[in-house]
Image (cartoon, rainbow, N blue to C red):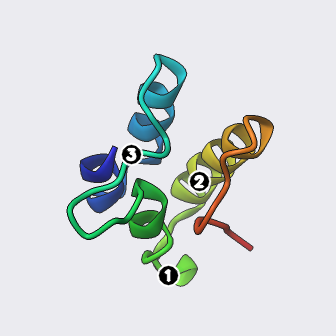
Amino acid sequence: MHLAAKINAPQLALLLLQTGADAKAQNQQGRTFQYYFAQTPVHLQNSELREQYRQLESWLKSQQLAGHYTQP
């Protein structure tokens, strides 16, 4: 999950979550994967990537797992 976030791959994160990955897993710094997705400025995202972020955020909200990560 953390790697998917660090390489800016929301579609991979969503796939992992849908197949049972733990959205609350923390790394050694105590951060969940959502922290790393929140680091990507919106102005650096193309429309396709923004849509993938919206899909991920929608899934997280539907599972009541949205935390640090939000997109405008």
Which is nearer the N-term, disc 2 or disc 3? 3
Mark 3 or mark 1, which is nearer to you? 3
User: Which residue, given by chain and number where applicable, does mark 1 sit on?
Assistant: 41
In three-dimensional space, the C-alpha distance between marks 3 and 1, rounded to whole angstroms, equals 23 Å
Q: Which mark is residue 25?
A: 3
The location of residue 64, given as percent across then percent down, is 75, 43
Q: Rate crowding at label 2 as few (under 14), some (14 to 19) or many (20 or more) other CA atoms within 10 Å.
A: many
The answer to which image quadrant residue 13 occupies is top left
Q: Rate crowding at label 3 as few (under 14), some (14 to 19) or many (20 or more) other CA atoms within 10 Å.
A: few
The location of residue 63, given as percent across then percent down, is 73, 35
| Amino acid residing under circle 3 | Ala
Q: In the picture provided, is 35 more to the left or to the right than 66?
A: left
| Amino acid residing under circle 2 | Tyr
**Residue sitting nearer the eye, 42 or 36:** 36
User: Which residue, given by chain and number where applicable, does mark 2 sit on?
Assistant: 53
Q: Which secondary structure, mark 2?
A: helix
**Residue sitting nearer the eye, 54 or 45:** 54
| Amino acid residing under circle 1 | Pro
Q: Residue at x 66, y 67 (%)?
A: 70
Q: Residue at x 69, y 37 (%)?
A: 59
Q: Residue at x 60, y 59 (%)?
A: 50
The answer to which image quadrant residue 40 occupies is bottom left
Q: In the picture provided, is 68 more to the left or to the right than 63?
A: left
Q: Which secondary structure, mark 1?
A: loop
The location of residue 39, given as percent across then percent down, is 43, 77
Furthest toward the top, the residue is 19
